[in-house]
Image: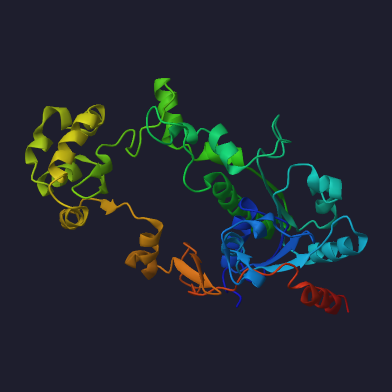
Amino acid sequence: MSIQGPLSGITVIDLTRVLAGPYCTMVLADLGARVIKVEIPAGGDDARHFGPFVGSEEDQKSAYFMSLNRGKESIALNLKDDADKLIFEQLLSRADILVENFRPGTMEKLGYGWDDLHEKYPRLIYAAASGFGHSGPYSKRPAYDLVVQGMGGVMSLTGHPDGEPTRVGTSVGDITAGLFTTIGINASLYHRQQTGQGQKIDVSMLDCQVAILENAIARYAATGEAPGPIGARHPSITPFDAFQALDGYLIIAAGNDTLFANLCEAIGQQDLAKNPLFESNPLRTEHSAALKDELEKALSVKPVAQWLEILEKAGVPSGPINSVDQVLADQQVNARNMIVSANSLKMAGNPIKMSDFDDPPTRSPAPDLDAHRQAIIAELSNLDD
């Protein structure tokens, strides 16, 4: 089943593996592009060998790989072999986009660097996602998600004061690089429409971590002090934190004076809103520890579910801290078709909802290694004829 979308008719040659690149090309496939995944013959994408695995003992498949490569085609090519290079070049001559996430210099060694490709295929858009980008003193270094989370400052902001260094719970180093690469590709498609020319997109995982530091850079620029980890609370909006109730934690985000007053009334603590320590957001932030103590005293008498009902009626932004199984069962998540399936395996859906295109609940599965070789070669032969 191919997805119809705004990128229908666009062909992507996907040289990527593991996460950053495959995440990018998965989004392109979800938007309707045809994605032909070119893998090495000996084992294919490394992620095919990452657990957890599903299926019978004779036919085990990586759930990790399947969740990132749905709806793609696979052909195994050795780009050092002349016959396979010819097939690859035939694919490039008909493609709109090439995506790769090799270490910089790898494509040049194979004879497929940007300068060569742009000369031969001037309309081809070349997108490269790498650890540190194609310029700068670190460009040749290898990188993984954890490396750039550490180097990009995100880990310095994550966790609790005086705690051990803590990785963000999902691979935001890879995923943000995949998303920024996707954005660059879509902008380049528009640029090509205007100029007729493809261009090179160079996305660095480290750059992307710096790009999502958000107000941390502003705080440092304004105060001269490097921010550190502060747990779940917001550094400049209070109350905006995880609070303990009778049977667990809930999130409360009262981002202005009106919401704070509504919160105080909802929990039966109207006097808190009149307390000189808490009269404004800057004061509440300055005295955040004292305010949290007061709020948790009030919240401790009722369970989370009851407080969430009360706060919803009061119009105070709040929510539970869901485990992954609770997320998959959430009625809002399911109403938005954010849990889809491919070959009965559940996975995250496409968060981009478009009025002109369907958002089907089932998707084509990830391909077996080299599964589309014969069909692709036959298609190339027919086009040549």
The coloring applied to the image is rainbow
Residue 65: % across, % down? 61, 61
Q: Residue furthest front?
A: 57
Residue plotted at (25% across, 49% down): 248
Location of residue 87 with respect to 343 vertically, above or below: above
Give the side of residue 370 with respect to residue 310, left or right.
right
**Residue 136 showing in the rendered view:** yes
Of the 4 image quadrants, the one containing the N terminus is bottom right
Residue plotted at (92% across, 60% down): 82
Residue 344: % across, % down? 52, 74
Residue 291: % across, % down? 19, 33
Location of residue 141 with respect to 47 vertically, above or below: above
**Which of these two is toward me, 329 or 56?**
56
Based on the displayed image, in which of its 4 quarters is residue 355 positioned?
bottom left
Give the side of residue 203 with respect to residue 238, left or right.
right
Location of residue 173 with respect to 5 vertically, above or below: above
Of the 4 image quadrants, the one containing the C terminus is bottom right
Residue 75: % across, % down? 76, 67
**Residue 186 showing in the rendered view:** no
Based on the displayed image, in which of its 4 quarters is residue 288 positioned?
top left
